[in-house]
Image (cartoon, rainbow, N blue to C red):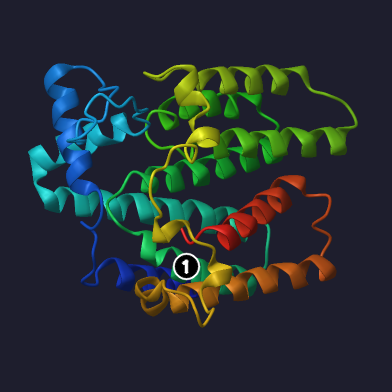
Amino acid sequence: MKKLLFALIPFTYLFLLLFQKDLSMFGDLGRHLKLGEIIVSCRCVPQTNLFSYTYPDFPIVNHEWLTEVVFYLISSLLGLHGLLILKMVLVITTASLLYYTALKKGSLFWVTVFSILSITIFSTRFHVLPELISYLFMSIFIFLIEKYKESRRISTLWLLPLLELFWVNMHIYFIIGVGMYGLFVIENFIKDKKIDKRLIVIGGILILSTLLNPSFVRGAILPFTVFNNYGLNVEENVSTLKFFVPTSTNTNIAYTLTLQVLAFYILVILFALLLFFRQFWKNVFHLGNAVFAAILGLRLVR
């Protein structure tokens, strides 16, 4: 009963954020819907920038084509309200998986505190965009890896390469899945003092699955090359460390994301403090994920 009451706190907060009047249809949704329509119509994935007037033949890697198809089909069947429902399902499922997993690792009080801070941070990313798919995949990866740690059932991990196959065709954050699995394998080696060949095989298949996209190698290495020819400055790509600099020109972000940035810094400070009071050092999987997330958060507002 106590857990249920505490769970109501962050999830009530989450529901209030999801049902508020926001900019869910903000950003690149129109482009995604149009591309989804084109892909369904031609049964092909365009490899050039169809939206460029001056350079229509510019080669691109469409790393979100499958999500665009899903968005287009849902909007065709259920209208834009269908996309809002999809958004809520993705966000709530992601939050539920992470909350459930966290409760098995931490105290009820701290899980609730960190949940509220995390929801506050991610509340600005609740747009109907492909990255919502990545949040879901991240939570499923964590959930399945923790399930394996508990049961040692290798069948649980065989789902990861299949998930990665979908992920690489749905959003560019797919590389995080590879990194998460790598951290898990390192942690397993440190604890068992030996290499489990089955984990290596699954990891190899997981990596190979990233090649199964319309652009093959170019698509698999896109996370490492995406900024090579970005072409313009995007406010989302600035560092949060520059947020409160008096000379900063990012006023649009500064006025709308101040609460989220402060919540992020509080979360990072709390995490750093807990490292000294609890032995997280041997938990390479969660420690590595947390450090990686903190570094990315400091470098990119996105």
> Callout 1, which amino acid?
Ile
x then y, percent, for residue 256: 36, 76
Residue at the (20%, 56%) spot, across then down: 25
Near mark 1 (Cα within 10 A), the count class, few <14, some 14-19 or many ≥20, is some
Looking at the image, which residue sits at the far front? 54
Q: Which of 290 and 95 is in front in this view?
A: 290
Disc 1 element:
helix
The C terminus sits in image quarter:
bottom left
Residue 212 as seen in the image, left or right of residue 183: left
| 275 w.r.t. 44: above or below | below
x then y, percent, for residue 219: 45, 25
x then y, percent, for residue 13: 39, 74
Q: Tally the numbered discs.
A: 1
x then y, percent, for residue 103: 61, 60
Residue 29 as seen in the image, left or right of residue 270: left
Residue 276 as seen in the image, left or right of residue 133: right
Residue at the (53%, 24%) spot, across then down: 161
Residue 276 sits in which quadrant?
bottom right
Mark 1 lies on residue:
121
| 39 w.r.t. 142: above or below | above
Q: Nearer the viewer, residue 70 or 240?
A: 240
Residue at the (47%, 22%) spot, across then down: 218
| 121 w.r.t. 132: above or below | below
Q: Is residue 180 visible?
A: yes
Residue 175 as seen in the image, left or right of residue 44: right
Looking at the image, which residue sits at the far right? 193
Residue at the (40%, 37%) spot, across then down: 171
